[in-house]
Amino acid sequence: MTGKEGDYRKGMKVNKGAWKRRISIPGLLALLCLLTGMLSGCGFIEWLLEDEEDFYEGEQETEGADGTEDSGSTVSLSERGTVISQENGKLVIDRRSREQEIPMGEDGWTIFVYLCGSDLESDGGAASDDIEEALAAYPSQQIRVVYQTGGSSYWYQDISDDRLERFVLENGELQKVDERPNANMGDAGTLSEFLIWGVQHYPAERMGVILWDHGSGSINGVCFDEQYEYDSLSVAEMAAAFDRVYDSMTDRFEFIGFDACLMSTLEVANQLVPYARYLYASEEYEPGTGWDYTGMLDYLAENPAADGKALGKQICEDYYVHCREADAQQMATFSVTELSGIDDLVQACNQAFQVVYEQDDLGDAARKILGADNFGGNTRAEGYTNMVDLGMMLDNLSDYGEEIERAREKLEECVVYNVNGRLHKQAGGLSVYYPISVQGSEELQTFAQLCPCNYYYALVDKVAYGAGTGSAQDYDNSSLLQDIADLAELFGISAAGISNPTTNIGEFASVDESELGIADIYFDCNGNYVVEFEDMDELAYACCSVFVNDGEDGIFYVGSTEEIYYDYENNLIRDDFDGLWLTADGVMLPLELAESTDTCSIYACEIMLNGEYDTALRIEYDWEYGEWSVIGIWDGIDPETGAASREVYELEDGDVFEPVYYWTSLDDDTEEWYLGDACTVDGEVELTYDYLPAGYYFYSFELHDIYGNVYYTPYITQEIDEEGNIWFYPEDMEDT
C-alpha cells in the first residue's frame, strides 16, 4: 500500500491542519499496545477509576436475543394456512379460504383479548389499567369484550396469578365466566384453546382479537409469559394457533390486533391473511398506556355496525391521542392493513427485489436500505430488532425501476390508514426484517421460515453470508431461486448463509489492507484524517470514534459522532471532528447513533439509573434548529427474552443517572464497563455541546460495512487544549 508523503520534524507538536505523512494499517491490538503508557496521568479519566468497580465484566451477551426455548409447543410446517412455492423463480401463493363466509352471530361485536400480563402487569398494573379503561366506556348490549388473563406473577385487579381466568365485559360489568389450570401464554395451544372456546360461547356478526403484552417484531413474536421464563408466541406459533381455530369458524375475524410493540410487519401480515380482514399494529414500540380502550368501545357503542376499516381508523386516531397524553407521540406509529391486498403486495415486492438482487452493486442497494427508518433500537446499547420500514426502503430504491414503484403502490393500497409521529413521519405502515446486525443463526432460521418473497430472501441471505465472511462478492446463492413446493423448507435447510452460524456478526475487528477495498489511509494537507478506497461498494457508513486512555493498560470508549465528509466521486472519507461533544450537566455522554433522518438524529446513551437500573437515555438532535433534547428513557430489547420494552419514561426530579463507559484492555481482549459521574435531575437536563475536557484522546474511523460488520482504522493521538484546539503528534504514528 502506498502512502502520501509529507515532511515533519520528529517530536514536533503540530496543530490539526498542517501535516500529512505515510502510515500503514496494523492490527488493532498491536497498535494499541504501542500506544500504551503514552498518556499516563490523563486527568479526564482519573475520576472514572477512583473507587469504582466495574459492574459488567466480559463481553455483553447478545445471543439470547433469539428468545428462550419453546416450552413444549411444536409447530410443524404443515400447521399453516399459507404455503408459498416457486416455479421458474415466480411465487405461487396457496392459502386456506372458504367458498362462502357466514357471520357467526346476528349483530354486534365480540372482541377477544388475550391478556398476557407479564412484567407489564406485575411491575405497574398496565393490564389492569386497560381493563379499567374498558370499564369506563359506555355500556352497550351489542358490544362484548372477552378476556383471558395469565402470564403474570402478580395482578393489581382481583385476578389469579396461578391459573388462567376468563372474564366477559358486557353492559358495563365485568364478570368471571371460566377458569382453567395455569398454562403458558406463549404457547400456541393456549391461544387456540381460548379462541375456540370463545367463538363457540360468544359469537357475533363481527369479531376481533387483540394480543396484549410485549412484542418484538417478526423474529421473537409476542406475549412473553413471565411464569414460563418469558417464553413467547413466535409468529409461526401464532399462525398455527389461528389455523387450529379456523375449523371452528364460518367466517374470518374482522381484525387481529396487537397492543404490543413492533408487530406491524409484512411477515406477520402474511401469516394472518387467511384468518382476518385487517391487521392493527405499530411498527415501533408502544407506550405502556397502549391502546385507548375507552375510545374504542365508545365508538363501537355508537357505531355497532362499523366494519374493521372504520374501527381501525378510530383506533389509530385514539392511539395517537393516547400517545400524546403520555408524551410519547414523537416516536408513535400505528397502522391498519387490509390483509386481502397482501398477496398482490408480496408478488410486487418479489418482483421489486428481483431487480435489487440482480444489481451488480450490492453496496448501493444495502446503503439505501439502511437509510430507511428502523424501529425498536438497533444499537449495542439498546439491542437489535432488525425491523426496517418497507415503504421507506422502497422509496430509497425508487431509481431502480418501475417494479419498485409498483410495490410501493401495492403497499399504499394495503395500508388503508396510519398515523405517525414527528420522528417517523415517512413510515409506510409495515416493516420487514433486514439484518442490520444479525444476532445469531437462529434469528436467520426464524426469518427463513417467515419470509414470503424468494428474491428478498436471497438478498438477505447474501447480506447474512457477508456478515459471516466479510464479503459476499463471489457468493452464489442462485439455488435459492430454484423450483420448490415450499419456500419455508428450502430457506430453512439449504441457505448457505443460514446453515452456517455467523459467529462474528457485528463484532469489532481491526481493519487491514484487504478489508472494504481500502487503498490508503493518510492525513491530508489540512490535517484531516482520510481513508481512501479502491471503491466504496461495501462501505455502509462511518462514524468518528473517540477513546481516552486510562493511564494504565486500557482505553475508554467516549462515543461516536457523524462528523464525516463523504466524497463518493473520489472514493474517500475524511473526518470533520472539531473536538465538540455532548454533555449533560457537565458530564460527557457516551453516544451511539441509533437512527438518522433528513430532519434529526437519535442517539442512545447507556446509563445506570438510580444506582440499580441499567437502561438507555435517548437523545434527539434536530438538524433544522440545531438543538439537542432528551426524548426519555427506553430499556430497549431484553437480551434474555428478545422482548421490547413498551415504555419510554421521562426523567423525573430526583432521578440520578450515571453514564456507562465501555473499556477495553490494551493487553488482551478483556472488556468491562465502568460508571461515570452521577447527574441528578432537577428540572430539565442541561445538554451542552462543547469542547471535550483538555486532555489526550485516541481517534479513529469506525467503518460499518453493508453486512453489519464493524472495523476500526488505526488510532491517532489527539490533544485538546484549554482553548479547544486540537493537536496531534506525528511521531506517534511513525512506527505503526
Image (cartoon, rainbow, N blue to C red):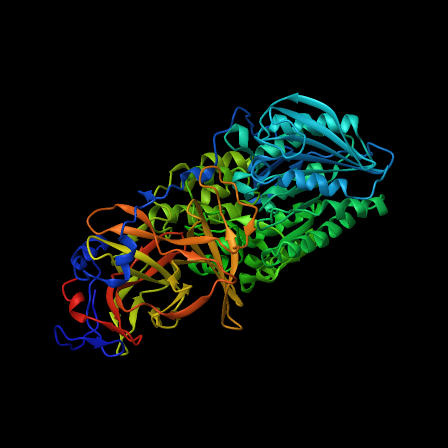
Report the quarter where the N terminus lies: bottom left
Residue drawn at (30%, 67%) of the image: 531
Residue 533 vertical position relative to residue 461 in the rendered view, above or below: below
- Asked whether, in this view, residue 440 is left or right of residue 394, the answer is left
Q: Position of residue 213 (x, y in %)?
A: 60, 39
Camera-side residue of 25 and 197? 197
Coordinates of residue 357 in the picture (x, y in percent): 49, 53
Give residue 223's quadrant in the image. top right
As drawn, the residue found furthest toward the top would be 181
* Residue placed most toward the observer, 58 or 336: 58
Query: Where does residue 25 sit, x and y in percent of width and height?
Result: 22, 60
Q: Tell me, yes or no, if residue 369 can be seen here.
A: yes
Residue 345 place in picture, x, y as percent: 64, 50
Quarter of the C terminus within the rendering:
bottom left
State whether residue 567 appears in this view. Answer: no
Please name the residue shown 78% across and 26% down the image. 201
Q: Is residue 149 left or right of residue 621?
A: right
Say above or below: 12 vs 114: below
Residue 47 sits above or below residue 570 on the image: above
